[in-house]
Amino acid sequence: MSLDAFIHDLQFETEKTTPFDFEVDWDDGPLPYKLYRGLPTFPLSSEIPLTLENQQASVKPDLHQIGHVLWYVCGLTQFSQLVLLSDILDKSMGQVQSARRFIPSGGGLYPSELYIYLKLEDLPTGIYHYDVAHHRLVLLRSGNFDSYLSRSLGTRCDTSACFGIAFVSTMFWKNFFKYHNFSYRLQGLDAGVLIGQFLEVVKRFGYHSRVYFQFLDRSVNHLLGLNENEESVYAVLPLSIEPMMTCLGTEDRLRERVLASELMKELPSVSHDHYIRSRRILEYPMLIKMNQASMIESLQLTPSSVESIKPTIQEKDAVALPPVSRLSYPFLSVCRRRFSPERDFVLQKISRELLAALLHEAVASYIDPKDSEEEENQPEPCVSLYVCIYGVNGIPNGAYRFDSTSHTLHQLRRGDHRLWLQQAMPFANVNLTQVPLCFHVVGRRDFYKKEWGYRGYRIQQMEAGMLVQRLLLAATALGMGGHPLLGFDVNICDEIYRIAETGETSLIQIPVGPHRHRARLEGRLQS
């Protein structure tokens, strides 16, 4: 199968991505976290702060504080026991037990891993893996790698001014075992959600970061000791006390050319024993093929310049939203309360002011420095928000595009589209007739292939995931719930918004609204 056909099926004909006779071997499923064995470990403090409001950035970050950051980003935060009503007629009950994190993940599988390069006084300088299961750091390679990482990023970041650099990777098997080839689409979104949470957390600790989607994959994987057929880094996020600055100007970038193959010769290979539990791992050739096609062998970059598609819409279709300010909310409390309702949504009318606050907060918090956007000017996001509205006071029911610049909604199709949206759901796990807001993150159909090649697909998925996480945090802060969904007919949703002809498509669906609490027993994993 060609890569273009594979991506087309991932987006528009998802039933083709999984063989009809594929069966999930639940008894041989992988752990939701990676466990290294036989390496030096450094325990992290379990005395997690109960609030992140008014945190002051430390002039000298220490291991104690870094441990708090990592826990908030992707640590185990609660144990949940959920009661399922498996058969309404005979009232038979089932139970699902799981250790959860603040971030959502498709199927609760958490395919992303977090690594970090740290230069702290109370810790040996080197590359570490965050051991989620034990809340500790595992030392993978000791030494100072400032120069190596700077060149791996195309000399676009002053790594010597950073006290740490985080790496978000994807382990392919962790959700291929359940979703087969469809996992490739899911993995990018999962990575984006984690990145979104990472950026929100470090802000509250007073640190500065930046997202690098483009880097020398093989040199970074080599540094971490990853087998690129099992796992690969998707994003690099430097950390500093001062605002992030690029290292070189455009002319310097044009002169500087870095090859991954040459860079890798500077460091010996390392291979570490790790445990994932599965005894039998199926082959996933298309995921490996996509990963290899997405890799960057050399970096000789100029500042990116990409254009978002902006549909022409008459001003008479614009609905001005009331002016609102950024939300101020207790971050830990919101992370704890975030919940993905399924049949738990309860239809209630919501105010125009609440919708305005939700949209403004989601988009405003999403605008972070990224190498996928212009650095000199206000960045133009690579993805945007569309929404089907029902029962919002003062706004006619219909399908809308949100224009964050003018803080307006542009109506694309009038009417109640809840039944149409429900028809697009292959599984009735969410009752969309009870949902006042059904959001869609929308991006270009060509996934910026001309600008970024096949890497553009995973970049677009990560961008979508970053926006989804901000939308979920904002919805929770406003007393609502949101449930990210990939199980929907993209063609139907694109028709609702009439965006196929503009070269856009729906990347992910997020119904948002009031909900009842589900019957489940929860316990916090925090001292």
Image (cartoon, rainbow, N blue to C red):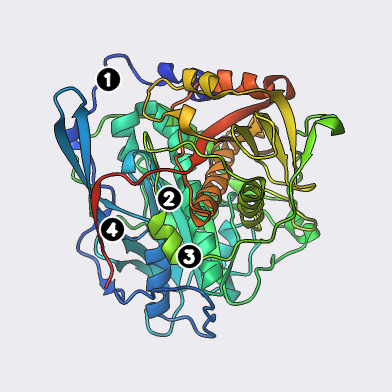
Q: What residue type is labelled 4?
A: Gln
Q: Which amino acid does label 3 sit on?
A: Phe
Placement of 47 over or under 384, stated as above or below: below
Placement of 287 over or under 275, stated as above or below: above
| Local SS, label 1 | loop
Q: Distance between the residues labelled 1 and 4?
A: 32 Å
Q: What residue type is labelled 2?
A: Ser
Q: Which amino acid does label 1 sit on?
A: Phe
Q: Distance between the residues labelled 2 and 1?
A: 26 Å
- Quarter of image, res 57: bottom right
Q: Which residue is drawn at 66% across and 28% down?
A: 399
Residue at the disc numbered 2 = 169
Q: Earlier in the sequence, mark 2 or mark 4?
A: 4
Q: Distance between the residues labelled 2 and 3?
A: 25 Å
Q: Earlier in the sequence, mark 2 or mark 3?
A: 2
| Local SS, label 4 | strand
Q: How far apart are marks 2 and 4 (CA)?
A: 23 Å
- Quarter of image, res 22: top left
Residue 485 visible? The answer is yes
Residue at the disc numbered 1 = 22
Residue at the disc numbered 4 = 78
Residue 238, image x and y in percent? 55, 65
Relative to the observer, which residue lies in front, 472 or 26? 472
Q: How far apart are marks 1 and 3 (CA)?
A: 41 Å
Residue at the disc numbered 3 = 331
